[in-house]
Image (spheres, rainbow, N blue to C red):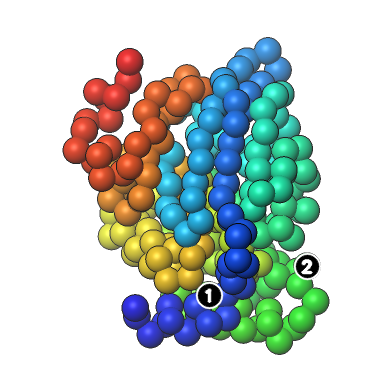
Amino acid sequence: MPRLYAEILRSWPLILEPGLTMTLKVSNLTVHHGAICAINQISLEVPTGKLAAIIGSNGAGKTTLLRTLSGLNKPTTGEITWMGESTTGVKAEKLVRKGISHVSEGKSVVPELTVRENLMLGAIWRRDNKEAKQSLDEVTSIFPRLGERIEQRSDTLSGGERQMLAIGRALMSKPQLLLLDEPSLGLAPLVVEQIIDSVNQLCRSTGLTVLLVEQNANTALGVADHGVLLALGKVVADRPAAETRTCNARRLYP
């Protein structure tokens, strides 16, 4: 294990209690946008400390799924449980306190704030300033570019740096479940590789559970433990990523 991640592991609050199953479960989830059914009876399960990739074309329901898991969208029917507790319909701010962080697509940061100020927004609910400072050090160790630009305004950063900042801000809350929506969107392949590799190493070394939404199937399945293919709001394939990588995604559609 790299030294950096070994150090972070010692401070990450992922201590499993005996008999506690920290698993994300989605059962028969349906979500509507007005009259449109965006997600139709989706069921899936993500074990603790694993990285699951949700792949599919535009309009497949990937973003809607993440927004519903993070409390930004309200489901029509179905059940979501995390760590054995129902989170169905729970508001987003409460889910952050329960250890669920969501990085939306589009490198969402506050442009007029500095890198430091953006990162500290991710720890705004934490009462211990010492712990928040420790998290800041950890995030800038994972993404050294952020440390180099800590006092720069966020609107002066490159696209890749803004994506690192968005992910880093989510990590400031010490999540146990990280929801990543299209982190590769609009970025150069080398930058994508750096970001995905950092998230993958963090998942492996700390037990962080990651749900990664991607259109780029090769990128997602290259690091994932499990692959779920969505089409028109339905699960059409759900299998280990090692098996999914051997197939062309197009062949998985019925």
Decide which of 195, 28 is in the foreground and name it: 28
Q: Residue furthest top?
A: 35
Q: Residue at x 53, y 30 (%)?
A: 43
Query: Dividing the image into 4 quarters, which one contains the N terminus?
Result: bottom left
The dot on residue 139 is: 1
Residue 42 at x, y = what percent?
Answer: 54, 27
Disc 2 crowd, CA 10 A, few/some/many (<14, 14-19, 20+)? few
Q: Say left or right for 34 vs 2.
A: right
Residue 234 in percent (x, y) is at: 48, 22
Looking at the image, residue 5 lies above or below residue 69? below
Camera-side residue: 249 or 144? 249
Tell me which corner region of the image, top left, top right, bottom left or bottom right, holds residue 227.
Answer: top left
State the quadrant of the C terminus: top left
Residue at 34% in and 80% down: 2
Crowd class of label 1 (few under 14; some 14 to 19; many from 20; radius 10 Å): many
Q: Which mark is residue 191?
A: none
At 37% from the left and 28% from the top, the residue drawn is: 237
- The amino acid on which the numbered mark 1 sits, given as a three-letter code, is Val
Find the distance from the CA under tag 2 to the CA under tag 1: 17 Å
> Mark 2 or 1 closer to N-term?
2
Whether 67 is drawn above or below 222: the answer is above
Q: Where, by quadrant of the figure, is residue 75 drawn?
A: top right
Q: The residue under label 2 is which amino acid type?
A: Trp
Report the residue marked by disc 2: 125
- Residue 15 x, y percent position in the rendering: 59, 71
